Image (cartoon, helix red, strand yellow):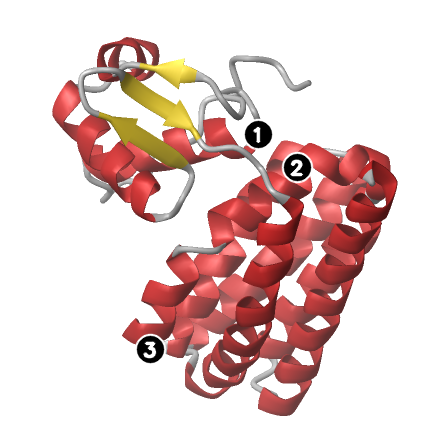
Amino acid sequence: MPDATPPRRPRRPTETLTERAYRALEEAIVTLALPPGDVVSEAQLAARLEIGRTPIREGLQRLAREGLVRILPRRGVVVAGVDVGEQLRLLEVRREIERLVARAAARRATPAQRARFTEIAAGMDAAVLANDETAFLRLDQALNQAVLAAARNEFATAAMALMHGLSRRFWFIHWRRSAELAPSAEVHAALARAIAAGDSELAAAASDRLMDYIEAFTRATLDRDG
């Protein structure tokens, strides 16, 4: 179980308090600092993150739309549970959308965005060398966001927002028993490099390999847990 107080994330210069609250809460849930079934209040989270209750409330509403929390009126906020069958159904949809956005990102990325993909890939390599799972998860989120930004498809962005957090948390919960950091980072970095190179077919193939890896990881978890 990771430390209940994860390292503080660097603040982005242009992010709003709501965005900051969402990012901090999402990471706490994904890394199990807020574990499945935990019941918390807006006041507790505001004190913990040193952010006002309004940004916390808005961040929680976004997390509720993404399926990571359930908001119970007058009772608090419950961190959603984890379900392997749900994860496999999610991957059926995610595979198709990921391939589409990978192709689009490779075609449409700006030079600055391509440089960012190269930077993310290098960061993945460094995370493996340092065996730093938190750094990997942050880069994974950065890759997800970079792909969607480069693809410039608002419909795909809305669909993927409902899936990425759930997938990242599932990986974090199970990876020590079912996977190693290096193979996961390798398939993610390959996708980033294919998009950086501007090769849409290579990016689509890298996306499929990433989804193959994630599905195999998920099924291994199902087989092990019965």
Tell me the SS state at disc 2.
Answer: helix
Question: Compared with residue 80, is residue 86 higher up or lower down, i.e. above or below?
Answer: below
Tell me the SS state at disc 3.
Answer: loop
Tell me the SS state at disc 1.
Answer: loop
State the residue position of label 2.
172
* Front-lying residue, 164 or 111: 164
State the residue position of label 3.
153
Q: Amino acid at mark 2?
A: Phe
Q: Measure the alpha-carbon separation of dots 2 and 1.
A: 6 Å
The quarter of the displayed image where residue 99 is located: bottom right
Label 1 crowd bin: few (<14), some (14–19), many (20+), radius 10 Å: many
- The x, y position of residue 31, in whole percent, is 57, 29
Question: Which mark is first along the chain, 1 or 3?
Answer: 1
- The x, y position of residue 36, in whole percent, is 53, 26
Q: Measure the alpha-carbon separation of dots 2 and 3.
A: 28 Å
- The x, y position of residue 97, in whole percent, is 50, 75
* Front-lying residue, 25 or 72: 72
The quarter of the displayed image where residue 197 is located: bottom right
Q: Are marks 2 and 1 in contact (CB under 8 Å)?
A: yes
Image quarter hosting the C terminus? top right
State the residue position of label 1.
31
Question: Which mark is first along the chain, 1 or 2?
Answer: 1
The quarter of the displayed image where residue 50 is located: top left
Q: Measure the alpha-carbon separation of dots 3 and 1.
A: 29 Å
Q: Amino acid at mark 1?
A: Thr
Q: Is residue 46 left or right of residue 92?
A: left
